[in-house]
Image (tube, rainbow, N blue to C red):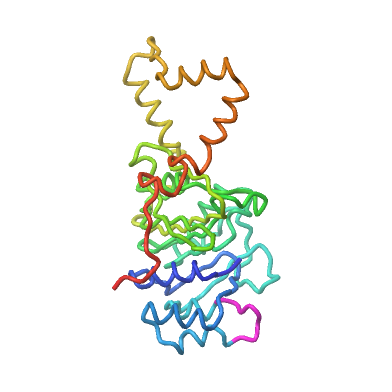
Amino acid sequence: MGIDVESARFLLQSRQQGVRFDRCLTLGRQRYFPGKRETRRLFRRFGFPEEAADAVFESDEEPPFAEPFWKALGAQEIETLDRSDYEGASVIHDLNEPAPESLRQAFDAVCDFGTIEHVFNFPTALRNCMEMVKPGGRLILHTPANNYCGHGFYQFSPELFYRTLNEENGFCVERMIAVEYGPLRRWFEAADPERIRARVNVINAFPALLFVQARRAAVKPLFSRWPQQSDYVSLWTGREQGSPERKPAAPWSVRIRRKFLEACPRAARAIEAFRHSPFNGAYAWRNRRSFRSVSKNPRQ
């Protein structure tokens, strides 16, 4: 668990855009991984003084714990939550279980940089995170999306967070960024599948993580209705409004694929493998319906 250069950049952008970290809770006690030179460069780009960058490394720990970085973002009070005190967390709580009342609506920012994918009871863990945010505060997540099989219990899709951090639950997603951890460290804004009426799929060669920033606009009962995947909701709604007796004919492309499969099954399977690959633009970052390239540089 910790702050790498991309998550540091994301947090500095958030601060530049007005996010408050006055009373801040992190899931797990975070380490800070960028080096001094890289940190100074980042701080300069976002208008922070270099002495604030140097203060991040005031500890002899290697890598240092991230509390000085959070203070540079404006945090006046920092709490760290973990199941164990092995790294010196200030709040000991298992996120598999509901959070105590004393933590609810208590923080301007609740930040996770590598925890919730390791919590088996994910719905309860996410509910805890949402409940701990003050009205007007932010929930910020940095969590695996692609190519992290075996890292934790789960990998997550944009659909999950758009369907949970929504108006019905009192939240609004402000930013949803997919970061590809390849040589270029590219950033892409991930679209809401409900808005574009299509799944936001990607098959890529490098690990990818989701950076999510959501604002708690109002205190509402959480999950009074269970989230449902948007394309299925659309299908169910269409069926309910239409005539269930008549089944629509399969598209011509589906019929042709079916005949090809019956005639040449091995060739059909080989072609199918290419269809579900980055060679197919529908599953690539270049699918501009699902992803939009965004700049990592600060706004001027």
Q: Outermost residue, left direction?
A: 300
Please tell me which residue is depicted at 57% across the width and 88% down the height of the picture. Answer: 58
Whether the magenta-drawn stretch holds residue 93 is answered as: no
Question: Is 33 displayed left or right of 190 in the figure?
Answer: right
Residue 154: x %, y % from top left: 60, 48
Residue 262: x %, y % from top left: 57, 15
Could you tell me what secondary structure mostly forms the magenta stretch?
loop
Please tell me which residue is depicted at 57% across the width and 25% down the height of the picture. Answer: 268
Please tell me which residue is depicted at 66% across the width and 74% down the height of the picture. Answer: 88
Q: In this picture, is 34 found above or below 179? A: below
Residue 172: x %, y % from top left: 36, 53
Q: Nearer the viewer, residue 297 or 15?
A: 297
Q: Nearer the viewer, residue 200 or 70?
A: 200
Q: Outermost residue, right direction?
A: 86
Q: Which residues are magenta?
A: 59-66
Q: Quadrant of residue 253?
A: top left
Q: Nearer the viewer, residue 99 or 32?
A: 32
Q: Quadrant of the C terminus?
A: bottom left
Q: Outermost residue, top direction?
A: 245
Q: In this picture, is 232 found above or below 285? A: above
Q: How many numbered discs sit on the rendered protein?
A: 0
Residue 234: x %, y % from top left: 37, 30
Q: Quadrant of the N terminus?
A: bottom right
Whether the magenta-drawn stretch holds residue 64 is answered as: yes
Q: Outermost residue, bottom direction?
A: 51
Question: Is 29 displayed left or right of 133 in the figure?
Answer: right
Please tell me which residue is depicted at 59% across the width and 30% down the height of the picture. Answer: 270
